[in-house]
Amino acid sequence: MARLDSTLEERAASKQVGALRGLSPFLAPYRILLAFSLLALILTASISLILPLAVRRVVDNFNAAGQILDQYFAAALVIAALLALGTGLRYYLVTRLGERVVADIRRAVFDRVLGLSPAFFERLLTGEVLSRITTDTTLILSVIGSSVSVALRNVLTLVGGMVLLFLTSAKLSGMVLLLVPAVVVPIIVLGRRLRKLSRENQDWIASSSGSASEALSSVQTVQAFTHEDQTRAAFADVTEKSFVSARARIGTRAVMTVIVIFLVFTGIVGVLWMGARDVRAGVMSPGELIQFVIYAIMVAGSVGALSEVWGELQRAAGATERLVELLNATDPVQDPASPISPALPIRGDIQFDAVTFRYPQRPETSALDGISLHVQPGETVALVGPSGAGKTTILQLLMRFYDPQQGVVRLDGQDLRGMTRATFRKAISMVPQDPVIFATSARENIRFGRPDATDAEVEEAARAAAAHEFIMALPQGYDSYLGERGVMLSGGQKQRVAIARAILRDAPVLLLDEATSALDAESERLVQSAVERLAKGRTTLVVAHRLATVKQADRIVVFDHGRIVAQGKHDELVAQGGLYARLARLQFTDGTA
């Protein structure tokens, strides 16, 4: 939580309402719609300023002939009809513009975040990103679709009303102007505090969302360790801090509203008193006084509305900052400005040349320390060693989820950093240690490996991965919904679906990260046979703890503390002694392999 607190201080100290300018790139494509919205806004503001003139005519000519009086009332009805039409048009155009812009922002932020490397998500919780896409964009929608429109309308009403006030009575208008500093000062002073509290409140909401997302995505682990009370307490603590922050924001805004409204309407009462004396003295007509009072109320209402809208604009400014922060986030892994195109088809020649790598969140520890490894096209290489030795890191660097601090990773002789990530990743098929199952059907989960695959190809891949039988046993077979994160499947079934996905991709490079660790003996035998068939003619890297699954590999590379300590075939490594021989003795002697 210290990280969040420091972030709050940094953001609160540097941001202004001017951050709303960050929305301009999203408004630019809709200039015509924006122009029509402004025209409708000006029309309604102008018509509302005409109404008091009509009221004055009616009052001052109340004793005139009935026909003239009827004409004045008819004119007032026409003005009211135009006001209603203009208001409806303004609402439609502005609301439509807001929905369109927010949809574009959500899409742009999601597109940007989806392409960021895993290093970015080491610094920012997924739940916080989701909060920015949902909560913050909802705030912006409120501002574009309502608050900005209200603000502009009230600015026009304020300016126009002040001009007409002076034309009606310069003396009384001078008194009204004396109230302006008294109203503006609390808006500025309390507004600054309100902006800070608004941004802090939004960050606590994001933290709350991230905490809930993390707990719910790991609900089985939470329940298995009877950690419900502690998790509830942690969430309650963050939620309570969010409430306390919101309470402070609401209190500040309430105080500002009380001060502004009291000062404004106190001034109106004083002006009314002087105006009534002028009417009795014959200095102004009753209609002029009523006209002045209406304009004064409109001006006061505009000032009060602007004080409220100011708070909304500040919250939206904070939301805009957070979204622009995501759009402008610096990704440590970048595609080159002038990428090279590898020779096709990709053969699968992999080379690590003196590679040293440290994870961004653990800069003092080398996950890989001067690794040099060459894998020939079509070779099957197993990576073994204790947990944390650097095996999975090899696969992550090969996928270019991260870049090494030193050394070069090459594919077919080309530095990965010289190619776009999409180019070389198309040549790689990966089965991660923790298989990802999407909340869709079994068929679509497998087809994720190659979206243009036919149903027959999907089923063929499932058979090769020993997944066909259990899929057909599901209620709707391949069309069965697998639930969020595959809750309908066992661990072994998830891995077989993931392997089927990799088989369907049919890429020249195959990466298997503990791909058979959750399978029973029979399924493991079937999948192992499928993997061996699939590996023929492909470059295959297999990360494994169970040595029985890699005994037939062309080469076994042994890792320890981020370094390669031995490599060779199974029998050779056993004969050499050392770490591999010790691991083999433990597994095969215990019969656990």
Image: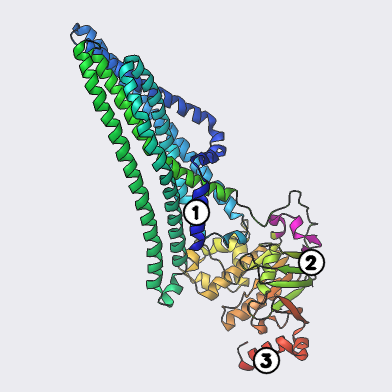
Dot placed on the residue nearer the N-terminal end, 1 or 3: 1
Disc 1/disc 3 C-alpha distance (Å) = 56 Å
Check residue 591 for magenta coloring.
Answer: no
Q: How many marks?
A: 3
Of the two numbered discs 3 and 2 in the rendering, the one whose residue sits closer to the viewer: 3
**Left or right relative to 289: residue 99:** right
Q: Nearer the viewer, residue 538 or 68?
A: 68
Amino acid identity at mark 3: Arg
Using a 10 Å C-alpha cutoff, classify the residue at mark 2 as few (fewer than 14 neighbours), some (14 to 19) or many (20 or more): many
Q: Which residue is mark 1?
A: 9
Crowd band around label 3 with a 10 angstrom C-alpha radius: few (<14), some (14–19), many (20+): some
- The relative height of residue 560 versus residue 189 in the rendered view (above or below) is below
Three-letter amino acid code of the residue under disc 1: Glu
Q: Nearer the viewer, mark 1 or mark 3?
A: 1
Residue furthest bottom as drawn: 589
Residue at horizontal 56 percent and vertical 34 percent from the top: 28
The secondary element bearing badge 1 is classed as helix
Which x, y percent locates residue 111? 58, 50
Secondary structure under badge 2? loop
* Residue interval drawn in magenta: 408-424
Secondary element at image label 3: helix
Query: For mark 3, what is the residue?
Result: 585
Q: Which mark is residue 538?
A: none
Q: Are marks 3 and 2 in contact (CB under 8 Å)?
A: no
Q: In the rendering, which numbered label is found on residue 349?
A: 2
